[in-house]
Image: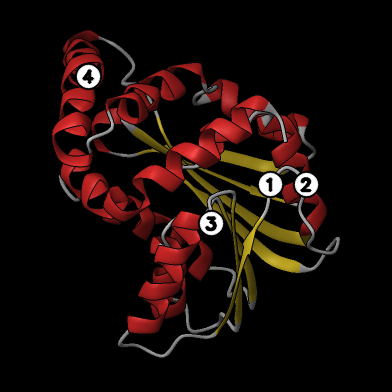
Amino acid sequence: MDGKSRYVRQMFDRIAGRYDSMNRLMTGGMDLAWRWQVIEHLANYAPHRVADLACGTGDMILMLSRYLPSVREIVGVDLSEGMLAVAAERLQRAVHSVPAVTLSAENCQELSLASQSVDAVTCTLGIRNFSDPLQGLREMLRILRPGGRLAILELSEPRGGLLLRGYNIYAKHLIPWIGQLCAHDRSAYSYLPASIKAMPQREAMTALIRRAGFREVHYKEMPLGICVLYTAEA
């Protein structure tokens, strides 16, 4: 395991218990609305088997199982066993019917899933944590059946102007402070804005997805430009 992957795994193991509440707090609950965009996109293709990569505490798995009736099986993959433990607990407490779910602690850049074995791949707020996003995208393409759908949701910086200025103040100063106050982990929430800045965004990200071998690559900005949905076809 490379250095970044090891750091990311240890960091998310530390904050797993507070991850969901921190997400809701830092995004004002918008992260759930962003994930709903993934559901609406995949509903057009009625996938049966879905791989949710960097699945974290299971937000996307729970939404897929509740709002996509076509889904029969979900494979959730994440580096952090701590995050997967929280996901397993949430799935056990789910009040709605849950399809077959397998949770696997492994590197999303070296998946154990068979080639051409899933109808859709989702990755929400996670690809920026990959040490090699291009390799991760190539793995996503490998496991997708021909014509399968990719949906990646990732945080981004606003394009410019007052929104970008306000975002920079929030990201550089308020997020680490909130992380220290609520999660007792300033370093994890200093990593967050740094990882967003380092990740290709919008046109650069769509170019990377095409380079991995996908076609019909598009992106859609969420309100304020702080999150983007990327979609593609295998």
Image check: 140 left or right of 160? right
Work out whether 99 lies above or below 158: below
Mark found first going from the N terminus, 2 or 3: 3
Residue 107: assigned label:
1
Of circles 3 and 1, which is in front? 3
Query: Does any portion of residue 219 appear in the rendered image?
Result: no
Name the residue that disc number 3 marks: 81
Callout 4: SS: helix
* Residue 136 in view (yes/no): yes
Q: Quadrant of residue 131?
A: top right
Distance between the alpha carbons at the discs numbered 2 and 3: 16 Å
Q: How many marks?
A: 4
Query: Which dot, 4 or 3, sits closer to the camera?
Result: 3
Label 1's element? loop
- Label 4 environment density (alpha carbons within 10 Å; few <14, some 14–19, many ≥20): some
User: What is the x, y in percent for residue 31?
Assistant: 29, 49
**Nearest to N terminus: mark 2 or mark 4:** 2
Circles 4 and 3: CB atoms closer than 8 Å: no
Classify residue 37 as left or right of residue 99: left
Category of crowding for the residue at label 1, using alpha-carbon neighbours closer than 10 angstroms: few (below 14), some (14–19), many (at least 20): many
Q: Answer above or below: position of 31 versus 3.
A: below
Q: Nearer the N terminus, badge 1 or badge 4?
A: 1
Left or right for 122, reference 27: right
| Residue ID for mark 2 | 110
What amino acid type is highlighted by mark number 1? Asn
* Camera-side residue of 171 and 57: 57
